[in-house]
Amino acid sequence: MAGGARLIQYRDKCSAPGAVYRACRRLGPLLKKAGVLFIVNDYADIAAAVGADGVHLGVDDLPVGACRRVVGDAMIVGRSSHSLETALEGARARIDYLAVGAMFPTGTKPENVVAGLRLLRQVRARVTLPLFAIGGITSKNLDKVLELRPDGVAMISDVLNAPDIAGRVRALVRRIRAANRRIRAANRRIRAARRAGG
């Protein structure tokens, strides 16, 4: 939060659901006060119980329809996609965003196949939902991801292993905003050139 992150997902693959609930119950009010979107990974029931802004589902988690019966229509529901097929399937469901990846090898899910930047490009061409690039994204490869204009990026190890977490997030936010400005400027130039060309 101190570094300027605008969306934080609570992800805990090791603790029991009760411990996840207690952590989310403490975290939720802090994020709400700061105006940061709060997404709970995997647990629709916990997201609903703590009043989170949303829940994130993996491909093998609760089906979207069942999740909606738990959290309702107002809550944000996102879903992971590791192939074009799962991305298109997710886009047909009642979700609000897709997380696409893994972009690169990642220690948090070493068993996942690396889908690569190509998948993000394919999904962007076929899906109008907001897209988040996920998996193995670091300060060193971030620019390659930003060139494909995702709506957001998810980063874990590069942030949490930094000696100064808030400082690392601030630096990343600056880079993302600068890339967005460059993209908008390039788009304006393209539109102007098209108008000039008739």
Image (cartoon, grey):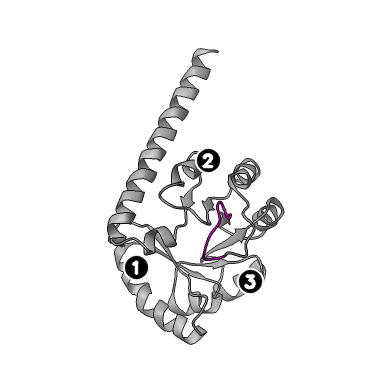
* Left or right for 183, reference 13: left
Give the quadrant of residue 31.
bottom left
What type is the residue that disc 3 sits on?
Answer: Asp
- In the rendered image, the vertical position of residue 148 relative to residue 54, given as above or below: above
Q: Residue 22, image x and y in percent?
A: 41, 83
* Left or right for 9, reference 2: right
At mark 2, the secondary structure is: loop
Task: Identify which residue, 153 or 74, lies in the foreground.
Answer: 153
Q: Residue 19, image x and y in percent?
A: 45, 85
Q: Which mark is residue 164?
A: none
Look at mark 1 in the image and give the residue it sits on.
Answer: 31
Instruction: Count how many numbered circles sit on residues in the image.
Output: 3
Q: Earlier in the sequence, mark 2 or mark 1?
A: 1
Q: Which residues are magenta?
A: 100-109
Look at mark 2 in the image and give the residue it sits on.
Answer: 148
What type is the residue that disc 1 sits on?
Answer: Leu
* C-alpha gap between disc 3 and disc 2: 28 Å
Q: Residues within 10 Å of mark 3 (few under 14, many from 20)?
A: some
Look at mark 3 in the image and give the residue it sits on.
Answer: 61
What type is the residue that disc 2 sits on?
Answer: Leu
